[in-house]
Image (cartoon, helix red, strand yellow):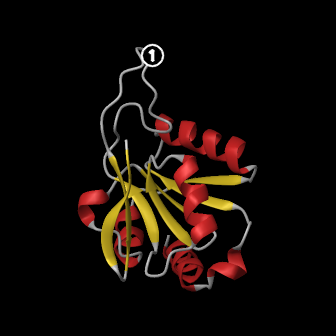
Amino acid sequence: MKIRLAAVLLLLALPSAALAAGDILLYRDPGCGCCEAWAQAVRAKLDRKVIVRDQVARVRLQRQSGLPPALSSCHTAIIDGFVIEGHVPVAKVKRLLAARPAGVKGLAVGGMPIGSEGMAAPSGARQHYDVVAFGPAGARVFARY
């Protein structure tokens, strides 16, 4: 467990160029089905391999990445050096990867909003939610749904 955490922290410390267009690491609460649905969307829309790992102790990873606790969700992904927390729409991940805004460490959708990427409801119901950019520059709304 400590070795895995050390590997994750090393990945977070590497420059994003060193990780560009590589595999995506997805750490999820064990057995969470919506995390797999989000991973499938990422695989399809980013055309990349997603390595899914069950991890009970993601809180340390979230803290090390600078994620505000209120933005915690059921999975944390590392994509090209960025931290993606929760059900962030893949279109917004693409926007982040293209823009690489200064002071942004990642994007987060707190909780598990109905209708967000990976959380589709059979009824088509949707909740309003924000995609929040966070990092050394603070937190700000990146997109609204």
Compared with residue 103, is residue 113 higher up or lower down, i.e. above or below?
above
Q: Mark 1 Cα within 10 Å, few/some/many (few <14, many 20+)?
A: few
Inspect the image, locate mark 1, and give the three-letter code of the amino acid beneath it: Pro
Q: Residue at x 56, y 36 (%)?
A: 37
Q: Quadrant of residue 70?
A: bottom left
Residue 139 in picture, x, y percent from top left: 31, 70
Instruction: State the quadrant of the C terminus.
Output: top left
Q: Residue at x 71, y 41 (%)?
A: 44
Residue 69 in picture, x, y percent from top left: 26, 64
> Viewer-proximal residue, 82 or 100?
100
Q: Quadrant of residue 18?
A: bottom right
Write down the residue under mark 1. Answer: 122
Q: Residue furthest left?
A: 70
Relative horizontal placement of residue 52, taking residue 44 as reference (left or right):
left
Considering the numbered disc 1 on the image, is that residue within a helix, a strand or a loop? loop
Q: Residue at x 37, y 83 (%)?
A: 136
